[in-house]
Amino acid sequence: MITVNKKSFQGWENCISISNGKVEVIVTTDVGPRIIGYSVNSGKNHMAVFPETAGQAGGTEFISYGGHRLWHAPEDAIRTYQPDNNPVEYRIVEDGVILHAAIEQETKLSKSMRVTMDEDGTVYIDHRITNHGMFDVEVALWGLSMFDVGGLLIVPNSNHDTGLWANRQVAVWPYCAMNDERVYWGDKYITVKQMDMKNAFKFGTSCHRGWAAYFNHNNLVVKEFPFFENAEYPNFECNFESYTNDRFIEIESLTPMVVIPSEEYEEYTEVWHIFDGIKQPKKDDEEDIDQKLRVFTDIYEDEEGCCGDDCDCCDFEDEDCWNDDCCDIDDEGCCDGDCCNCDGDEEYDEDDEEDCDDDCCCSHNE
């Protein structure tokens, strides 16, 4: 049974906890949309959350809160770093929550997430960017997860047999060294050890197999994400990127470059898994890494790459209706003109306009 409850967490008073009794994912509605908690069996939080910004909200500058967020690529100093400091509208559904941020005034884009959980603890994060401007916008959707210190990132190398042609690409940012001691360029895997080193390291790759893993806190976390052959990706065709310094490591997935027409949207899904009781391997012990990954790869990965034909993470254009214009998600959910969570108890009857304000649906206007 999946429970969805309101709670305070890390100083944010208005958070939503989604749990199957073992796995818990926590989103805040005070800022974002952001996932700020992810754990199993009441263990340590895998999301990096920073004490100096935890619980904060408001302001006009971008603030690094940590956790998981949605951006748009390629990275731009103005367009990408739009602040997400205000409360988000949200709608609780049977197995999770749907979050909508306000329209960014500089870009005329808005960001939404749907975070849900299966009975086995698998978490689905659907990301959506909507274009509210007058003109087409070309971007890549970009999901960034800031993970806690001390772990080991595993990125599988391509297993595509392309004969005499190259089967992968690797991008390295100009402030990085290829011989950085945190990185192991292996036969089967690229691994990155998060260490107490202030100088940043960032790389990207074409991750055909559509997943990356992180060992930490005696757990294994795996993120699945789509890969599309012959699509145009940012940064030398990277659908995966990672950035690390002394405070966190980011595990990032990207879609291909897409054109979003006016009043249209694009979306994609990440799938998260977490396994308990798995010790962190050495960064260059590929045999041990193989063995410890089998709890995931034996079940979820097929021989060709990320997933089989029916894998949810590869449905790039999900036609499920979960935006503000649709009320099909959950009979008990909140939709414009159907119900309104002004005080958390009353349903909104559109024939009684005094029940609540037009703009308070699932927001913090109480």
Image (spheres, grey):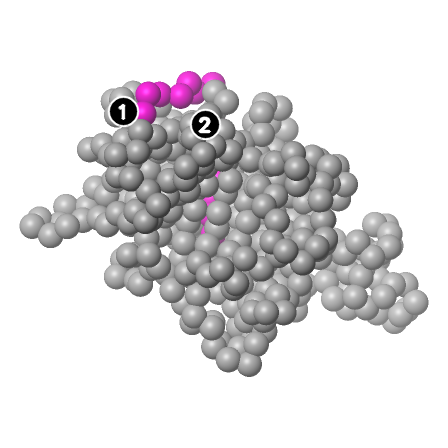
Position in image of residue 220 (x %, y %)? 44, 28
Position in image of residue 120 (x %, y %)? 53, 33
Secondary structure beneath label 1: loop
Nearer to me, 186 or 5? 186
Position in image of residue 180 (x %, y %)? 30, 33
Q: Amino acid at mark 1?
A: Asp
Nearer to me, 203 or 137? 203
In the image, is residue 290 above or below residue 270? above
Residue 328 seen by the camera: no
Label 1 vs 2, first from the N-terminus: 2
**Does residue 283 show up magenta in the picture?**
yes
Q: Residue at x 33, y 59 (%)?
A: 233
Secondary structure beneath label 2: loop
Q: Which mark is residue 284?
A: 1
121 sits left or right of 183 in the view: right
Closer mark to the observer between disc 1 and disc 2: 2
Q: Residue at x 35, y 45 (%)?
A: 175
105 sits left or right of 359 in the view: left
**Does residue 67 show up magenta in the picture?**
no
- Residue found farthest to the bottom: 134
Nearer to me, 275 or 339? 275
Q: Which residues are magenta?
A: 269-284
Q: Which mark is residue 196?
A: 2
